Image: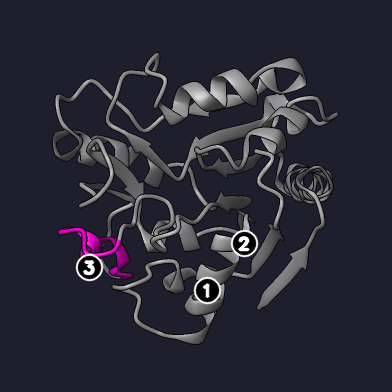
């Protein structure tokens, strides 16, 4: 199932997205006593994360983790963990548990196994919030990256893998397609006309190597909602 919601401004999108995510997390807490939220980095989700941090929810029963991470220290300005700690894990949401992807290994490749085992132990996600780059990547599943086929392999048995983008800095760890799909739902959060055009191209074709986001859009295992605005405020 694929649904698309369009908003005139980023503020309106953030408000609707927060309400949707809180309802999803609350439903899982009520049903099973806990919930797992997966978020992404970048500028687009900042307003969403900040607004979400203030919401009334039993945050002590929520685990937050990442769709991907740059292989940098947690105090590095480019760390997704830092972004989440600074913008989401504050206010009411400071009670949530956080599971990071970066570990003590020297490289992403060396840290892959431990991170994969940790993520594999978490169980089914409640909701995954993904972004998309103008090159069609999502999480850190980049076009033409050497490890992309492995990241998209639904039978890999890996929860996350090391990735080195061709045209972006840093080694990365990325959740694999199979682990992203092990979720109650996926939400694709997009801002700007350029990304609207990339989305239209992605929806019109089927080459996942060229635009890896197609692997999310074209699958039928996990419901996907697209939240999109032309507003680049974030």
Q: Which residues are magenta?
A: 143-154
Q: CA distance from mark 3 to mark 1?
A: 17 Å
Q: Nearer the viewer, mark 2 or mark 1?
A: 2
Answer with mark 3 or mark 1, whichever residue precedes in sequence.
Answer: 3
Residue 219 in view, yes or no = no
Q: Please tell me which residue lies in front, 33 or 45.
A: 45
Give the percent coordinates (x, y) of residue 90: 68, 17
Give the percent coordinates (x, y) of residue 105: 18, 25
Q: Which residue is drawn at the image coordinates 35% and 75% (left, top)?
A: 208
Answer with mark 3 or mark 2, whichever residue precedes in sequence.
Answer: 3
In this picture, residue 150 sits left or right of residue 225? left
Residue 149: which disc?
A: 3
- 21 within the magenta span: no
Q: Secondary structure at mark 1?
A: helix
Residue 213 in view, yes or no = yes
Q: Which residue is drawn at the image coordinates 29% and 73% (left, top)?
A: 209
Residue ID for mark 2: 193
Q: Nearer the viewer, mark 3 or mark 2?
A: 2
Q: Residues within 10 Å of mark 3 (few under 14, many from 20)?
A: some
Q: Secondary structure at mark 2?
A: helix
Q: Quadrant of the N terminus?
A: bottom right
Relative to 69, is 79 above or below? above
Give the percent coordinates (x, y) of residue 6: 77, 64
């Amino acid at each position: 199932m694929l649904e698309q919601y369009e908003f005139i401004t980023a503020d309106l999108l953030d408000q609707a997205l927060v309400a949707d995510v809180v309802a999803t997390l609350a439903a899982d807490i009520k049903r099973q006593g806990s919930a797992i939220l997966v978020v992404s980095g970048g500028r687009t989700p900042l307003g969403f994360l900040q607004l979400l941090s203030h919401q009334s929810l039993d945050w002590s029963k929520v685990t937050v983790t990442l769709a991907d991470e740059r292989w940098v220290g947690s105090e590095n300005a480019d760390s997704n963990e830092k972004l989440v700690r600074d913008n989401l894990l504050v206010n009411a949401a400071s009670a949530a548990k956080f599971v990071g992807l970066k570990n003590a290994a020297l490289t992403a490749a060396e840290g892959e196994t431990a991170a994969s085992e940790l993520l594999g132990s978490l169980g089914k996600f409640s909701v995954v919030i993904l972004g998309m780059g103008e090159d069609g990547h999502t999480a850190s599943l980049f076009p033409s990256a050497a490890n992309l086929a492995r990241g998209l392999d639904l039978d890999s048995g890996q929860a996350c893998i090391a990735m080195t983008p061709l045209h972006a800095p840093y080694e990365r760890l990325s959740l694999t397609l199979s682990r992203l799909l092990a979720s109650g739902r996926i939400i694709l959060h997009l801002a700007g006309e350029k990304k609207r055009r990339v989305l239209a191209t992605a929806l019109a074709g089927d080459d996942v190597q060229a635009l890896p986001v197609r692997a999310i859009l074209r699958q039928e295992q996990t419901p996907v909602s697209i939240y999109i605005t032309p507003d680049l405020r974030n």
